[in-house]
Amino acid sequence: MLQLGFGIDLPPADVASGKVLAGKWQAGDALGEPLVRIQSGPVGPAETYAAAQYKKNWYSFDENDIASKRTFTFLMILFSLAETGEGVAAPVVTVPSH
C-alpha cells in the first residue's frame, strides 16, 4: 500500500502545510514506474475510471490508464478475497452473581 502512494499527485497546499509527505515519483526513478497514477484536484473529474472525494479534494485516475486500472482491479479482487463476511465479534462481559 505504501508503494501505491508514490503514484499520487498530492495537493500542493497539503504538502506545503505538512499534512502529507511529498514522496512523488519522478521520471527516470530507479524504482521504475508507479503502480498507479492518481491525480488530485478541487473539482471532480469529468471522465475517469474511478474517483473519490476526500475532504476538499478529488482523487482519480484516467479511464485510458490501463496500468492503473489493472492494479486497481487486482487490489479490489484481493480485498474481496480477504473479506470474510463476518462482523467483528463484540467482547463478552461476565458479571458474577452470588
Image (tube, rainbow, N blue to C red):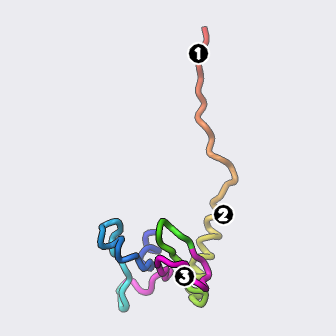
Q: Is residue 15 left or right of residue 36?
A: left
Badge 1 crowding class, 10 Å Cα cut-off, few under 14, some 14 to 19, many 20 or more, is: few
Q: Secondary structure at mark 2?
A: helix
Asked where in the image residue 25 lies, by quadrant, the reply is: bottom left
Q: Is any atom of residue 75 visible in this view?
A: yes
- Label number found at residue 61: 3
Determine which residue is flagged by label 1: 96
Residue nearest the viewer, comparing 30 with 92? 92
Q: CA distance from mark 3 to mark 2?
A: 24 Å
Q: Disc 3 marks which amino acid?
A: Phe
Q: Which residues are magenta?
A: 31-51
| Total count of labels | 3
Residue 45 locus on image (x, y percent): 56, 82
Q: Secondary structure at mark 3?
A: strand
Q: Residues within 10 Å of mark 3 (few under 14, many from 20)?
A: many
Say what amino acid the circle numbered 2 marks.
Leu
Q: Nearer the viewer, residue 21 or 45?
A: 45
Question: Which amino acid type corresponds to the residue marked 1 in the rendered image?
Answer: Pro
Residue at (33% x, 75% y) in the render? 22
Q: Which mark is residue 74?
A: none
Q: Which residue in the structure is indicated by mark 2?
A: 81
Label 3 to label 1: alpha-carbon separation:
57 Å
